[in-house]
Amino acid sequence: MTADPVLLITGASSGIGAASARHAVAAGWRVVLAARSHERLLELAAELGGPARALAVRCDVTEWEDQQQMVEQALAAFGHLDAAFANAGFGGPRGFLSDTVEHWREMVLTNVYGAALTIRACVPALKDSRGHLLLTSSVAGRRALPGSLYSCTKHAVTAMGEAARQDLNGTGVRVTLIEPGMTDTPFFDQRPTDALQDEDIARAVIYALSQPPHVDVNEILIRPTAQPL
Ligand SMILES: NC(=O)c1ccc[n+]([C@@H]2O[C@H](COP(=O)([O-])OP(=O)(O)OC[C@H]3O[C@@H](n4cnc5c(N)ncnc54)[C@H](OP(=O)(O)O)[C@@H]3O)[C@@H](O)[C@H]2O)c1
């Protein structure tokens, strides 16, 4: 087994999570790829060098048992965890009379409860390694958008980042909030123009991860140059 550090990513089957995995492996990390789409994770893990470099784990972040076995599999494969990126999430139509209540429920459970479960599942291992926790919030987690329950979920993630930072102070664990503006990923049914690319966010993730242990990059807010709000 190599001594290369280990990064676990939820929402790794697509978009920002998959791009972060590619950049992390290029920067010398081993990765644990978690999401519900196991086939896509297996393809990405093969692309990234197979079992020595990348482990694919099926995990629905809204299920505590899935999150526990995700960390157990990571530790069994690689022995320790140096960083965890709680990135899984999705949006929905704006308007408190739009969308369905069932979709609202899934979104709140995934974006808020799921991120909290990832923290809970990973923190013991991160304390052992004096590691690094990252969370994907959003520009929408910094300013409310009209009628957007998604924006409310991302405000919760922003608060979770600061709450975790204070909770973990003194343990050596660093906490970073990644706050992307509009990024061209499958997040959108109609793909945006003049948007960031997933690798633009991945570079920010690697920047935060590559600081020396005494430096905690708390928040990175990134908009495309063309985004007004
Ligand atoms: N794109 C943007 O403009 C933008 C801006 C700000 C913030 N963000 C945030 O960035 C994060 C990544 O989104 P993206 O833009 O990269 O979109 P994406 O390409 O659609 O990726 C979303 C990822 O979340 C995973 N996911 C969704 N529900 C899940 C669940 N219950 N359990 C496990 N994994 C789940 C998906 O995998 P499976 O479907 O395989 O489970 C997928 O890997 C999200 O938190 C999103 O809110 C995006």
Image (spheres, rainbow, N blue to C red):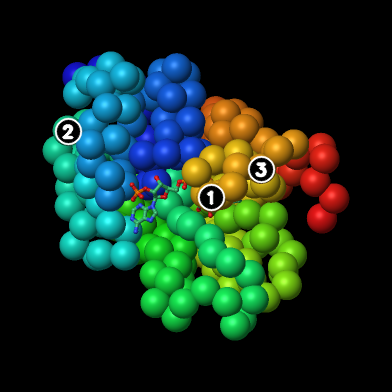
Q: Secondary structure at mark 3?
A: loop
CB of residue at label 3: within 8 Å of ligand 1?
Answer: yes
Of 47 and 54, which appears nearest the observer?
47
**Residue at label 1?**
189
Amino acid carrying label 3: it is: Pro
Q: Residues within 10 Å of mark 1 (few under 14, many from 20)?
A: few
Q: Residue at x 53, y 60 (%)?
A: 91
Label drawn at residue 3: none
**Residue at label 2?**
77
**Residue at label 3?**
192
Count of numbered badges drawn on the protein: 3
Q: Residue at x 67, y 36 (%)?
A: 196
Q: Residues within 10 Å of mark 2 (few under 14, many from 20)?
A: some
Q: Secondary structure at mark 2?
A: helix
Q: Quadrant of residue 131?
A: top left
Q: Whole-percent x and y of residue 95?
A: 64, 76
Specify whether 79 is left or right of 15: left
Specify whether 112 is left or right of 190: left
Q: Residue at x 46, y 77 (%)?
A: 100
Q: Which quarter of the image is occupied by the N terminus?
A: top left
- Location of residue 48 with respect to 100 vertically, above or below: above
CB of residue at label 2: within 8 Å of ligand 1?
Answer: no
Task: Residue lying at the far left in this picture: please name it.
Answer: 76
Q: Are marks 2 and 1 in contact (CB under 8 Å)?
A: no
Q: Whole-percent x and y of residue 201?
A: 60, 36
- Location of residue 27 with respect to 91 vertically, above or below: above
Looking at the rendered image, the disc whose residue lies closer to the viewer, 3 or 2, is: 3
Q: Residue at x 45, y 17 (%)?
A: 26
Q: Which quarter of the image is occupied by the C terminus?
A: bottom right
